[in-house]
Amino acid sequence: MSRASEEAARPAGVTPEQDRRNGRLFASTYIFIYFAAPVLYVGVVQAALCNKLGASATVANLPTSAYLFGAVAPFALSWLLPHRFDRAVVVAANLVTAASMLIVCVTLFLPFSDGVRIAAVVAQGLIQGFSGNISQVYTYQCLGRGTTVEGRARALKLTFSLSPIWAVAGSLWAQFVLNRGIARLPYPYDFGLLYLIGMPCAAAVAFLSSRYRLAPVEEEPARPPFVRYLVESIRSYARARDLVLLWFGYLLWYCTLNAMSNLSLYTREAVGRDPKELSGVIMALRFGGKALGGFALGWLGVRWGVRAPVIGSVVLVGAATLWAWGAPGYAYLFAFGLMGAGELGGAYFPNYQVTLSSPATGARDLALQSLVSPVSSIAPTLHGALTDHFGFRASFAFGVATAVAALVLVLRLPARPRRPDASE
């Protein structure tokens, strides 16, 4: 991008120094997010803890379900709060996450009953569902108000080239702790230690987020009642062709990504070994692929604009599913590297969304886009049902089909969209 075009793409009030500073802050927050991934990404650790506490499979999956429910929260805040609180929302959300982990720590380190501990884990999943979704939406809103298009491309390249290494470290540390690596830390204190470490990591994200420097946005004189705001927001979103294409492309990308569980289960059929035996290799391939993908997709974004890494992430998850479908023996495991790189669509779809929206509507539009996550939660069930009735290859065929459909949609998006100003 030339200097003239970069200036044209720069939001009003964003200086080159702000552009660099905010990008580095964003990258720094992900070091802590990824290191604490075992507890910040609600799912595996929470289900394992509930299972050890004696919960049924249904109850063990409640923390994940509760987390997904929190996707509705950012939209309500986009109506309730003026733009001057965008940065404060990110800070508060991460402090709430840290405080919610304290609840679990107290129940695990003190002699509470298993029922109370299960309730605490589920409640924490619900609280973090709200705070985590709010943090993600408003972090990208801050990035949109504090960086240029090219600055965001550089920030995302830096973030997702280096931070996956910390995810590997965090996951290996969690595996070490939960496998009785610390002799004097028996169950349930081993799980408690993971939450205890997660607390300062979430607090560090809050502190770093408080340092963002944002361009000013003109406040709306008055906000309509919530129901009218909801209807007007959906209508406005639905009238924008590019927003609709992006939303459905994101949904279809998620449907392909949600084949990840089936990829793991297929290990037994592909190589004749229990998935647990290869979990370390799979994790290394997944996050190693994410690190390489972070560099490659970031380079595409710098070189060819915001659409290129979106296309790349769709192609990668489709290629991962196709590779798993046809690769023989241990070569099949390469699919996890491809899928890990393709997971970065979770960053590049919102990044494209930020470019399409004005600073005034950014939080609202990101909140509507984030609803893709709970809507797509049916996809793992579909993959499982296809496998039960027709075998793994039916699930892989579904994943390839949704990736192709997503690719068709994102190719219809402009390569370098012009961001509306605050008045549009």
Image (spheres, rainbow, N blue to C red):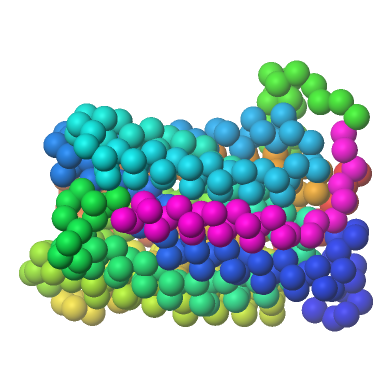
Q: Which residues are magenta?
A: 193-220
* Residue 343, above or below 331: above
Is residue 359 at least partly visible in the picture? Answer: yes
What residue appears at the point 24 percent right and 51 percent down from the top-left corner? Answer: 189
Residue 244, image x and y in percent?
64, 44
What residue appears at the point 24 percent right and 55 percent down from the top-left corner? Answer: 190
* Residue 214, above or below 247: below
Q: In which quarter of the view is residue 410 placed?
A: bottom right
What residue appears at the point 10 percent right and 64 percent down from the top-left corner? Answer: 274
Residue 359, image x and y in percent?
80, 49
Q: Is residue 206 magenta?
A: yes
Is residue 411 at least partly visible in the picture? Answer: no
Residue 268 is left or right of residue 107, and the answer is left
Residue 391, image x and y in percent?
17, 53
What residue appears at the point 56 percent right and 46 percent down from the top-left corner? Answer: 95
Q: How many numbered marks appear?
A: 0
Residue 412, image x and y in percent?
65, 58
Residue 211 is left or right of residue 203, and the answer is right
Quadrant holding the C terminus: top right
Q: In which quarter of the view is residue 8 placed?
A: bottom right
The front one of 271 and 227 is 227
* Residue 217, above or below 317: above
- By secondary structure, the bulk of the magenta-drawn segment is best described as helix
Quadrant holding the N terminus: bottom right
